[in-house]
Image (cartoon, grey):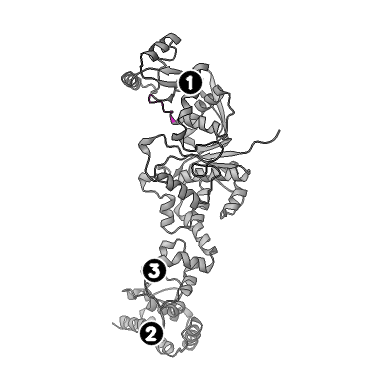
Amino acid sequence: MESKTVRTRFAPSPTGYMHIGNLRTALFTYLLAKKQGGVFILRIEDTDQGRYVEGAVDVIYKTLRRAGLQWDEGPDIGGPVGPYVQSERMGMFKEYALQLVESGHAYYCFCDKDRLEEMRKIQQASGMPTRYDGHCRNLSKEEVAEKLAAGIPYVIRQKCPTEGTTTFHDEVFGDITVNNADLDDQILIKADGMPTYNFANVVDDHTMGITHVIRGNEYLSSTPKYNLLYEAFGWEIPTYIHVSPVMKNATEKLAKRNGDASFEDLSAKGFLDEAIVNYIALLGWAPKGENEVFTMEELMQEFDVSGISKSPAIFDPAKLRAINGAYIRKLSPEKFLEFALPYIRESCKREDIDLPLLATLLQPRTEVFNEIPEQVDFIDALPDYDIALYTHKKMKTNSEVALDSLKALLPVLEGVEEWSAEKIHEAVFALIEKMEVKNGVVLWPLRVAVSGKQFTPGGGIELSEIIGKEETLARIRKGIEKLEA
């Protein structure tokens, strides 16, 4: 028997924001399809018009493309099972619901809002779970026909079995069994003729030939009802993969209302798109080996559903930074400078700076691009700094030692004719030898004098080359003045 082509789908709602958890679902869905040589489908679920945000579909397209998740079928490129926008598929859902009424797996419900509200209040007051009480479940054909003829508004509800159990298999959580008595007769078609999400997604998944469904584990409780629908139609049930949520910490979910970052936010903070995607892949999924830095091609090879965890994933900013740093170090010097330049220019406006040289100092010390402005803000002007910076236990310096070192350095550096790191290095190390001191005794005061900072991209010699001879000498003189004051 020939194996079936794997067809997966990502079906976001256009709410104007690509949540990290959503993007992870898209990524897992994409990787699952691509590993099997299958098809990745994009479907837009826009039937909840109350949450629809103008321009949100473009946010979805843009984010998926930037993340490298190119769909094979979708609203913009079409495909054999379109349309791929749920609101454009409306005509067929009622027909499918009527088939279920015909076969006894669904029924017309004529209960009005007041009756349902009253029922809910009584259930709540009695401490019972709130669910439909089956009032219209056993109306005779004549009663139904009479009410329809009278034009009484109705919904169509699923007729769930009231006895026995329903079991389904999930690739992450294993076999899950529920008592049918606990299942609510959910609405399939609303009073306005529109399908509910729970009905539309089952019909859409079947008619689009979806073989594997990856979604959040909040849908585990709805899955038995979905399976009863598949069985009622005689359709093949897809393979289910439910993933646990991405959490901010042990108690809070990652969410927009908590001010948590979307893909776009992280990108704007100076994280590389590829690094964000790589990190998102590791949220709730563990590769088999030790390596955690993967290209998209490598992720496709490595991804396996067996590596998905039942436990929620905690979003760890430090790990994201570390992965981003690994990606930054792998960039070519030219590519690094291209990414870094806007950030350099936020605080360093000097036009006479050797930017490629500065970039070589920054690249090994940068984990996120938005750290760069603070690293280079001393280049244009020396910040006002405290002379306590000159005291460094490990470097064996204090204010007095630093003053001696800077006074000895000044004439030495004045005498350097070809201003390059190599020549500055020669002159400085000749002085260190002559003074018979540890390297740090001279190098630390030089670094502080030219930068006014404790942490810099590179040491005093490299920084002196970057800011130029005149500026270096002026700053050393300033350091001497500060220390003498």
In this rendered view, identify the residue nearer to me: 478 or 392: 478
> Where is residue 158 shown, x and y percent of the image?
47, 21
Looking at the image, is 436 positioned above or below residue 278?
A: below
**Magenta region:** 191-196
**Given the image, on which type of amino acid does mark 2 rest?**
Glu
Q: How many residues crowd mark 3 within 10 Å: few (<14), some (14–19), many (20+)? A: some
Residue at 44% from the left image edge and 12% from the top image edge: 138
Which of the 4 image quarters holds residue 36?
A: top right
In this rendering, the answer to whether 455 lies above or below 49 is below
Q: Taken as a whole, is the magenta stretch helix, strand or loop?
A: loop
User: For this view, does 283 lie left or right of residue 343?
Assistant: right
Residue 470 numbered tag: 2
* Residue 345: image tag: 3
CB atoms at circles 3 and 1 under 8 Å apart?
Answer: no
- Residue 124 in sight here: yes
**Residue at the spot x=56%, y=37% of the render?**
80
Disc 3 marks a residue whose amino acid type is Arg
User: Gap between marks 3 and 2, in whole Å?
Assistant: 22 Å
77 or 416, nearer to the observer = 77
**Does the magenta portion include 304?**
no
Earlier in the chain: of badge 3 and badge 2, it is: 3
